[in-house]
Image (cartoon, grey):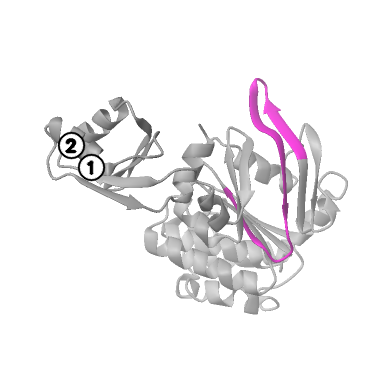
Amino acid sequence: MSISVKNISKSFKKVHAVNDVSFEVKEGELFGLIGPDGAGKTTIFRILTTLLFADKGTVTVAGFDVVKDYKDIRNHVGYMPGRFSLYQDLTVEENLAFFATIFGTTIEENYELIKDIYIQIEPFKKRRAGKLSGGMKQKLALSCALIHKPKVLFLDEPTTGVDPVSRKEFWEMLKRLQQKGITILVSTPYMDEASMCDRIALIQDGKILEINTPQEIVKKFPKAIYNISANNMYKLIEILKEYEHNYSVYPFGEFVHYTDKRDDFNPNELLQFLEEQQLQNIQINKTQATIEDTFMELAK
């Protein structure tokens, strides 16, 4: 295994940030840690990258123990933290050269690894990092994390605050890096990005809820789910929450995702009920569950 995490826990005074977490990441796998802010993702990343000690449990990365072999780990992993942490007053070129020097290499030596990414920011190589756009900062940070040719790449919420086009480009870059044999562990609060991973771990309040492929996790959603819309969405949500047969009601884009307690649920019965509540333009259509639906179910 490229990453092995066994029963790690970490507390900060009375806050249990990570609670008995275990998972494994295979060599060459793109593995996602999926959960909302405060779920424990960043604490796990800091333990895996030797920046924090776990209170208990064991972790190995690329065959090295995070406590006994922390120097070896730092030479074999790349880490892109959630907050942009490069030197704002250095140029793009200077930041990259600095990180290459720290690891005893050069930009030229490993240029082929970062070429697809760096070529997009190379026209701005004389610009200071603090003056780059969000998407450009992201590409520079990834280039710096890769410049020493790591075996394992850790990316902590790399697309937070980045526009949708840059998010899509970033995940395409990760897929290309994976094809080069790099093991990637990425965390994200965006449930739609989970489908880009080979396997995912859903995490909430420092605990793992489920580990599997995105496809298998979605299959585990226990009920039929419906998209519902009406002329007054706020009123629709309030009415559905008060409906005696509702099992779950969640806003989902332009719809409400609804599930019913009954196995013999009849959508026409619900339609009649909503019409009696003076709602108009009502649409009720069966839909496929998403990872977000499954997460909400598991987190109950």
Q: x and y percent of residue 60 in the render?
A: 81, 50
Looking at this rendering, what residue extends furthest in the right direction? 68
Residues at discs 2 and 1 in contact (Cβ within 8 Å): yes
Q: Is residue 214 visible?
A: yes
- Helix or strand or loop: what does disc 2 sit on? helix
Q: Nearer the viewer, residue 149 or 193?
A: 193
Q: x and y percent of residue 227 in the render?
A: 30, 47
Q: Quadrant of residue 114?
A: bottom right
Residue neighbourhood size for the residue with mark 2, other residues' Cα within 10 Å, grouped as few (<14), some (14–19), many (≥20): few
Can you identify the residue that label 2 sits on?
Answer: 272
Relative to residue 264, is residue 229 drawn left or right? left
Relative to residue 296, is residue 115 drawn left or right? right
- Helix or strand or loop: what does disc 1 sit on? helix
Q: Mark 1 belongs to which amino acid?
A: Asn
Q: Nearer the viewer, residue 59 or 219?
A: 219
Residue 168 belongs to magenta span: no
Distance CA(mark 2)–CA(mark 1): 6 Å
Dominant secondary structure (helix, strand or loop) of the stretch shown in magenta: strand
Q: Is residue 51 visible?
A: no
Residue neighbourhood size for the residue with mark 1, other residues' Cα within 10 Å, grouped as few (<14), some (14–19), many (≥20): few
Q: Nearer the viewer, residue 105 or 169?
A: 169
> Which residue is painted at 41% across and 59% down in the image?
133
Is residue 142 placed above or below 248 in the rendered structure? below
Q: Quadrant of residue 234?
A: top left
Q: Which residues are magenta?
A: 7-33
Is residue 46 placed above or below 38 in the rendered structure? below
Give the number of the disc on residue 268.
1
> Which residue is painted at 54% across and 35% down in the image?
38
Q: Mark 2 belongs to which amino acid?
A: Gln
> Which residue is painted at 45% across and 70% down in the image?
124
Give the number of the disc on residue 29.
none
